Image: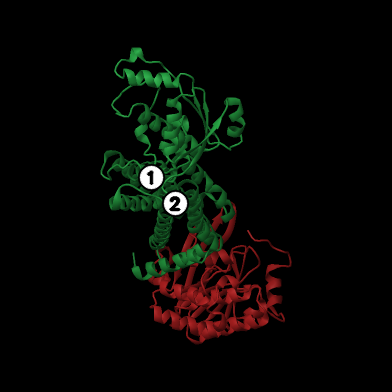
Amino acid sequence: MRLNRLLPMLGVEIKKIVREPSALFIVLLFPVVLTLAFGSSFGGAGTSSVSYSVGVVDLDHSTWSAGLQAELTGTQILHLSAYQDLSAATPDLQQGRLSALLIIPSGFGASCQSYRDNPSNASSWVLANVSVYVDQGSIFASQAIGPVVSQTMTAYVAPDASAISMPVSLSQPQLVSGAKTTAFDVVAPGMFAFASIFLIMIVSGAFTASRDSGLLRRLSVTPITAGEFMSANVAAYMVLAAAQMALVFIVALAMGWTPSGGAQGVFLGVVLLLIFSACNVGFGLITATLAKSQSAATGLAFLFVLPQMFLGTFVGSMLGGTAAELGKFVPSYYVTDALTSVFVRGASVTSGAVVTDLLVVAVSSLVVLVAGVFLFQRYGSR
Amino acid sequence: MHGRAAIDVKGLKKDYGEVKALAGLDLVVESDQVFGLLGPNGAGKTTLISILTGLQKATAGECKVLGNPISERLASVKSRVGVCPQSGAIYQQLTGVENVVLFGRLYGLSKEESKNNANGLLARVGLESDAGRKAGTYSEGMKRRLSLVMALVHSPELTFLDEPTVGMDPQSRRAVWDIVRDQKGLGRTVVLTTHYMEEAEQLCDTVGIIDHGELIALGSPSGLISKYGKDDLEEVFIHLTGRGIREEI
């Protein structure tokens, strides 16, 4: 490995990327636009929460039901509007004018009062069921509103927070920090992984273009070794990945992203995303090996982009069942999971789950990168 | 150096399945000369150059370049050889001078040496005023001239030029010819393939005509014209290879 050949090659590869408008768009501008869009939609620059429009059908008309509505309004996350009945509110929900519809049943006040009168005697409680219809067209509303209602209702009905059961079913209110955690904070970890995935397209396109133009053949008759050439290229894409990451982090912070985990968390994020970028360079090389031409590479890249995007990033976090299980087979899942644990759940960077995720990403990235380099050199370079 | 073989090929064979691209070719190219490799489409010229530059492996036979077996693919030998391929094979996003400097560095020159050589050669082929422009904006003729400079930046002892003037206007072609003559004047060896018989007559000390993977004629252009009693090299070429139109393999 000779640095006097590797370094000029590295410089050239960086220049090549920087001077290619389509590459810059996909790797730098696209993630920034994505971050701005998500930030303004779900985080909001200069604000700490996002507001959802929620319809309320109050069938109880009690001071308890009015009190609950006041509490929900007080979260500053939900903007309430009253409806006479379900049929009146349904069109607005179906047409996206409402993010959710809350039905407070008749007897809700009596249920709350029975709990307050005798919180330790469940047999004396009057049961009631509050229904929440969520806009299924909004993956974020469906994720955020239910927990906010649950948390607010728990705090309202059982302010001492010591009860393990109530006449109104409530679940895991501690999962939502309400006013402190925005939907943007929740999707940001997956968004960082999402941005890195597009390196696959850039790498596969660049390598197939070099091959199609005869540059690889030409370079192979110079003294530069295959190892030096590949090292320079991988290093160039790592530099690009670092620039992408810095840019996305800065824009996310400007858009109101409030990560937990402090400096250690950010350091883990940088390390994890750099390792994951190496994985995507490997997938790009595998794509370039399979593709007959640069245009074919763009299409083939989606073989690796889509599963990682849909199963492993913020998109995948909205899925359930089989899709959630399949996500465990793509590296982006572990990147998103680790970043979510540190940035959203507040886990320590040395906690077992985070370390496990890091190890899985590191090992899978090494395997994919080595496989990509080997396959491209063996089958894809000519 | 004069009198030593720059290239020594014995019994060289290359098969692509049933197709025999080279069928036991023997060839010696002496140093310090311009050698023209002629042949119809599909005769085996590009295959031969690919093997001589290490891009392909021969099916059988021996092959030495600058005294070293090509199978060893030594970096020390690579650094003494220049290759200008048929396709442009340049970095479109880099400027002309950046392309040349890169190849100088890859061949072991310092940054300063690379820049000096690049500027001199780019001026020699009329690209000095366009050296700072991205190569992707060049015309095809300019790209071909740039590609030639990239092959010569490290002052190689032996240079392979695969159809270096194809598609060029007369002025560009003359500029390339001047460069090739410069190389010979500096005591270097140039092996070029061409379909232009006038070019071979003008530039080459020796030409070898290959067809169906075999060497069918070898000598100076004037010697071959005289030997076969023809008016020019093109007549000799047609006489030896026939009038049938060939296709690439």
Chain letter of the residue carrying label 2: A
In three-dimensional space, the C-alpha distance between marks 2 and 1, rounded to whole angstroms, equals 11 Å
Q: Are labels 2 and 1 on one chain?
A: yes
When asked about the image quadrant of residue B206, the answer is bottom right
**Residue at (31%, 49%) from the top-left corner?**
A265
Q: Which residue is mark 2?
A: A196
Could you say which is closer to the camera, residue A166 or residue B107?
A: A166
- Residue A364 is situated, as x and y percent measured from the top left of the image, at 37, 44
In the image, farthest residue toward the bottom: B185
Tell me if residue B104 can be seen.
Answer: yes
Amino acid identity at mark 2: Ser
**Labelled pair 2, 1 in contact (Cβ < 8 Å):** yes
Q: Colour of chain B?
A: red
A355 over A106 or under it: above or below: below
Camera-side residue of A112 and B190? A112
Give the labeled residue for mark 1: A335
Placement of the N terminus of chain A among the 4 image quadrants: bottom left
Residue A79 position in % (x across, y down): 49, 39
Chain shaded green: A
Residue A222: which quarter of the image?
Answer: bottom left
**Which is more toward the observer, B75 or B242?**
B75
Instruction: For label 2, count other residues whose C-alpha is less than 10 Å away and answer few (under 14), some (14-19) or many (20+).
Output: many
User: In this orientation, which residue lies closer to the viewer: B15 or B24?
Assistant: B15
Give how far across and how far down residue A228 sits, in percent. 38, 63
Identity, as a three-letter code, of the amino acid under mark 1:
Val
Position of residue A264 in the picture relative to residue A299 (left or right) = left
Vertical relation: B62 (above or below) A157: below
Q: Is residue A271 left or right of residue A47?
A: left
Structural crowding at the residue carrying mark 1, measured as other residues with C-alpha within 10 Å and reported as few (<14), some (14–19) or many (≥20): many
Q: Secondary structure at mark 1?
A: helix
